[in-house]
Image (cartoon, grey):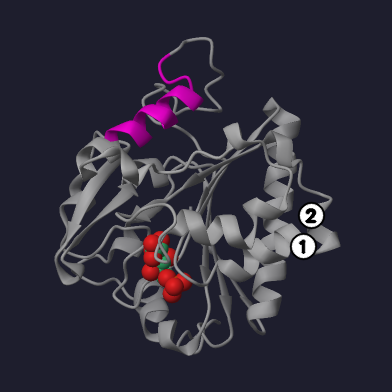
Amino acid sequence: MKPAVKVVENPTALFRAAGREFVRIANAAIAEYGNFSVALSGGSTPKGLYSLLATDAEFRSKIPWEKTHFFWGDERYVPPGDAQSNYRMAMEAMLSKVPVPEGNIHRIRTELGEPEEVARAYEAEIRDFFQMGRASVPTSRVGAVSKWPRFDLILLGLGPDGHTASLFPGTRALHEKARLVVANWVEKFQDWRITLTLPVLNHAKSVLFLVSGADKAEMVQRVLASSDADVLPAQMVQPGSGQLTWLLDQAAAGSLSLN
Ligand code: 6PG
């Protein structure tokens, strides 16, 4: 399915458009099976969206927080209270301000031990939530053969090198075909990341890239408009039976020739 590319004027419009999409998808999922599963993206761009969802009357009152389950697309290998933590960012911007039950916050528990152990624990939590493999689960919540979880929404960002989640160019995680979550060594950071794998991203019902700023324009153009021989990680996000949407502000779309 070709991605939908929507360009809005500025970051404020971007967060409001993303907020409306979040509310729409959340309420559709809850109407269909009683809860909503979303994997949050990290970094700095989504902070504005999370803050809006938690504080703006147009959004806060329209989200059934008690039926929403929050996961993360990736996490830095740092303690949950670290300034670099994606969990901490989402807690401060949103989750600490809304009535979401603690049991609905499925963070990547980086304090558990080695990166591989952290990845396996997070995978187990995802498998448990999606009741992976139990025939009773309607296939709309897991892939047709119940091998993959089917998140209602996965939010993603775009790095200047074309990475998304913690799937960085040239890293091993890009080739993972069996696991839901892996520990991924990122040479340029000389550090580990924990990330959902491409098959999980590509089995989501809806994937929403949120990209803002002129510093991303060149990469947005490469990802959306060119067929690089060496496929960039963000180009590998192609949800086979899901909706892929790129939500850009004009600055990030600056190099796109949208006809
Ligand atoms: C992370 C993110 C990462 C992020 C991009 C864009 O852990 O950093 O998951 O994939 O989305 O790097 O980050 P910015 O929004 O800060 O530019």
Q: Check contact, mark 1 vs mark 2: CB within 8 A.
A: yes
Say few, some or many: other residues with alpha carbon within 10 Å of mark 1 (under 14 / 14 to 19 / 20 or more): some
Marks counted in the figure total 2
Q: Residue at x 63, y 51 (%)?
A: 95
Is residue 158 in sight in this rendering?
Answer: no
Depth order, front residue of 148/56: 56
Residue 152's spot in the image, x, y percent?
Answer: 57, 41
Question: Regarding mark 1 in the picture, which secondary structure is present there?
Answer: helix
Residue 246's spot in the image, x, y percent?
Answer: 53, 66
Tell me which amino acid carries mark 1: Thr
Tell me which amino acid carries mark 2: Arg
Question: Regarding mark 2 in the picture, which secondary structure is present there?
Answer: helix
Q: Quadrant of ligand 1?
A: bottom left
On screen, residue 181 versus residue 90, left or right, reads left
Is residue 67 in sight in this rendering?
Answer: yes
What's the distance in space between the residues labelled 1 and 2, CA to CA? Answer: 6 Å
Residue 132, magenta (yes or no): yes
Residue 225's spot in the image, x, y percent?
Answer: 39, 76
On screen, residue 85 versus residue 11, left or right, reads left
Per the image, the residue denoted by label 1 is 55
Residue 13's spot in the image, x, y percent?
Answer: 70, 77
Quarter of the image containing the C terminus? bottom right
Q: Which mark is residue 156?
A: none
Range drawn in magenta: 120-133
Q: Is residue 218 above or below residue 187?
A: below
On screen, residue 39 versus residue 229, left or right, reads right
Depth order, front residue of 144/112: 112
Q: Is residue 106 above or below residue 77?
A: above
Q: Residue at x 55, y 57 (%)?
A: 90
First in sequence: mark 1 or mark 2? 1
Per the image, the residue denoted by label 2 is 60
The secondary structure that dominates the magenta segment is helix
